[in-house]
Image (spheres, grey):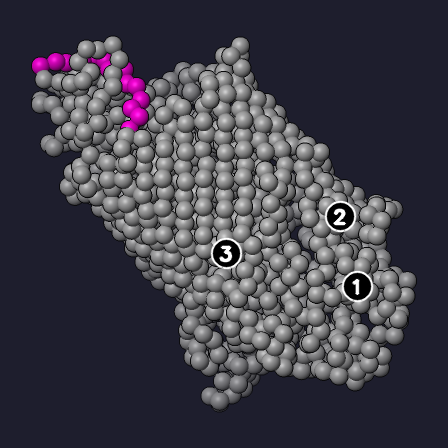
Amino acid sequence: MLSTAIIIRPHPRGIPLHTRHHPLAGALSLALFAVLTPSGENLHAQSTTGTIAGTVTSGGTLSVLISSANGLSRQVRVDSRGHYVATQLPLGNYTVTFSRDGQIIGHLDNIHLTVGSTTEASWTPPQGKQLSTVQVVANRAPPIDVGSVDSRTVIDSQQLDRLPLGRSAEAIAMLAPGVMTNSGGYTGPTGQSLLSFGGSSASENAYYINGFNTTDPLRGFGGITLPYNSIDQEEVYTGGYSAQYGRSDGGVINLVGKSGSNQWHYGGQVVWEPNFARSSQEDVYYTHGLPASPVAGKLYDPKSADKQATTTYDAYLSGPLIKDKLFFFLSGELARQDNTTVNSVTSTTPYVHSRTTLPKLYGKVDWNITKNNILELTGASSRDYTDGTIYNYDYNRLSRGSYINTEDQTKTGGRLWSAKFTSYITDNLTFTALYGKMKTFNYDVPANYDSSLTYLSDTVNQNPSLNGGTPVTNSQTVSTLYNSNRHNQTSNLRLSLSYQLGSHNITAGIDNLTSSAIDQGSQASGPGYTWDYGYSSDPTVALIPSLGVGAPADYANGSSGYYVIKKVYSSLASVRTSQQAQYVEDRWQATDRLLVSIGLRNDQFTNYNANSQPYIRQRKPQWAPRVGFSWDVDGDASFKVYGNAGRYYLGLPLNPALNAAGAYVSTSQYYTYSGIAADGTPTGLTAFSNPVSANNTYGVLPDPKTVTAQNLKSEYQDEFILGFSKMLGHDWVYGAKATRRLLRNAIDDYCDVSAIEQKAASLGYTVNATNSCYLINPGRANSFTVVDTSGAYRTVTLTNSEMGFPQLKRKYYSLETFLEHPFDGRWYGRIDYVFARSYGDTEGQLRSDIQQTAASTSIDWDFPALMSNSNGDQSNDHRHQIKLFGYYQITPQWLVSGDVMIASGNPRNCLGYYGPNQTDPDGYGSYYHWCGGLPSPPGTYRLPWNKQVDLGLTYHPEFAKSRLGISLNVFNLFNNQAVLNAYPYYQISPKTADPLYGAALIRQQPRYVRLSLNYDY
């Protein structure tokens, strides 16, 4: 729980009332309940509203009037038991006025709503007395939210101002238990580091802004987020959310932006992160021998030469356009980064000086059309513009050299707009409608591009007898070309109808999402191919016999073991997907102490290829039941036991339509060579293979009927949660929660085309498939549609045993414990400990250990040999996680804060050639779970513990009436730079060591300092 609230409990629940200016305060019983804990969960995930509910214990005809500070009012009835509820209220401060027989008997002021939560406001007037005004003050005793059943953490804007956090939605979400930085180094549309929730891969999460789905549709890599100071509240869901929401089996980040009010507000902030206060990164060295033509001895990447300085400007303005009717909030953020990056000795862009501009905009208009109808309009934009200059670099002297070229100009991020209409049709019936559109960009165009030059890679593997011991290169820095119009589009429609029927709150609705990827894909630069140099220490061994790639020594100039690969690739297409869902759920207050939530969701997914032909039709019902309960054990909200069980479906991203369902080309042809030209290209070539592709990728668009296994099922996961939260005295809350997640089904590509052809032949069919790979449900039998030589469609079924695979397995369990001291005006503190394990033979949609970005078409399940020894701890497994954070108000002017994270390291894999004889049966190279001829399952080795301490100090000078703030933050105080991902490849060819094996690819960010100055009026 990460929010502060005014908290008062009614006398029957054992917590005294605190009032001001009234002698009968001790006799009066009130309840104002608005507390969030990590186990204090909520029914309405990803919502933008809250609920007020309570009990009125007074005779006569009762009514409740709920009024906001912005002029919105809503009259609700009190039922025969004295209960009332007002759902889907916009966030803000409210006054609840209680009337009996038309006469006001009292009211509660300053009721602050928290997103998705139920705030309790109950009234019990004293015997023989009637009060018309009660001024509420905070009670230090924090009750527990017994009105919710899911798992979430909420951070509000006040806590964002106090805690030392990175300025991103993901950095905020890291406060939630069980959430870790992904181990693959994946980043979102504007460079933010993506997260793993409960061991899942980084592409399985969902992002929302004001109820609109902003998740990247191409690969699921993050989403558009808000300017940091425009975040009113951020919900972080780690499980158990309601049937109203889906398309995630990881976690959810829901951002609710700020809104205007009847008061004018403005302000600004300047944030400075200077390079001189940033520690140097650790250099990377060869760890497993040296390459054939080393550039600077053991040095691989002098990361200590990198530099970065960032300055951020932020401003906002809000207020009424028409008092009590029309309000606006407008904000902008502009970050400028000046970067110097020295890349590895093998890079064609050795030294890059770049400039990055990151503008973010946010605007919101709220219109109270009538007292029963409101309209909210949201606009947001988040961009990343980068360009720079490339220079040579002397890796021995560690100094910049001559100018090479201008770096690619890139523009990423996107913009969106949404409109939400809410109508309180009657006291018990509410209708909502949300519609919006988003466009995300991925512009990447090289400047001063020279198409006459061929891109070279791995030049350190050149034959030293031909280059004099120093790699020969050229000035081609561009390996891949993209269409300048490359972008994605998304539209989201949500409709819901909610009805309060006695003790039941029943909601039904639809949730439709349509996405398109326009002009996506890429192609090789230069003449349409690149050269990749290779070396084998045993040139008499065939490199890839299964593809007809022989031994270099059998050909002219190959006895030395040096060879080169000509790589051709191209994939350009526009594709789209349609995802629809219907849901119904009932939130039933079965007794005064027991809340039961029962929901059912049905998802349908359709994916289209480049010719707008559907290649996946998952239109049959995909039922996702959700059941949860919350038991107020003692009836005073001091002890809560809760549980949740649910199924969550995940739609296929757009990415597979560009490869498994696309007409892409990716071939390799192997040559020996007798010379190296001045531009670094090989001469005196002798081919010892045809153009080959392990995945049959020769540029033929497959028949959409043959792309997937028949009756392909969506990826889905079952989740089970059981926990409790309990008060410890009047100042503390503690609790524990057990979670179990089971991945029941997944989608990935299967590329053993010959196995299908052989099975077809055994059935009497002659098939020559042109498919590169097939999308299947791994770990079970799959039936394929194939076309025989007569043109007839045939069905070929392979059992899981015939495919040579293990059963699909990704299992996760965790035990979370926490102890929290809510803010009492002086200090706030919280500590979480999580014991967890994520294990099986698949991470999910991605392979983080090899940093593979092709969601749902990973290297897993391509061939049986790749799944040998695949069972073990998966890449995002952190067995122990400790998080401690809080703040202390030393004086009204000075505040100190801290954030500590300690986590055990994730697995470090060793991947090599297959089997004891170290062969390459599938043409994948050093990608098998074998290390030097020995089995090497995931989790055999571990990376070191991650430890980080962040500190903050904030000063609000008294002369500025707390409007001026000065903050100093130090991140990673002790400059720990633990390895988060290590180079996993043990060999570059059979029995030939890879010099980089075990080297650090990703580390913790080094220590840096942030100074900020802000003013708010």
Residue picked out by circle 1: 460
Cα distance, mark 3 to mark 2? 28 Å
Amino acid type, label 1:
Val
Residue picked out by circle 2: 342
Which residue is rendered at x = 26% and y = 13% of the image? Answer: 20
Task: Give x and y (percent) for residue 680.
Answer: 85, 63
Residue picked out by circle 3: 876
Res. 951 visible in picture: yes
Question: Mark 1 falls on what kind of element?
Answer: helix
Amino acid type, label 2:
Val
Q: Which quarter of the rendered picture does the N terminus lie within?
A: top left
Task: Give x and y (percent) for residue 57.
Answer: 13, 25
- In which quadrant of the rendered view does residue 236 lie? top left
Q: Foreground: 490 or 104?
A: 104
- In the picture, measured across the screen, residue 937 lies left or right of residue 376, that is right
Which residue is rendered at x = 45% and y = 33% of the image? Answer: 886
* 132 falls in the magenta region: yes
Badge 3 or badge 2: first in the primary sequence = 2
Task: Give x and y (percent) for residue 565.
Answer: 75, 70
Which residue is rendered at x = 62% and y = 47% of the image? Answer: 977
Amino acid type, label 3:
Asn
Q: Which residues are magenta?
A: 128-141
Res. 46 visible in picture: no
Task: Give x and y (percent) for residue 660.
Answer: 56, 66
Q: Foreground: 370 or 748?
A: 748
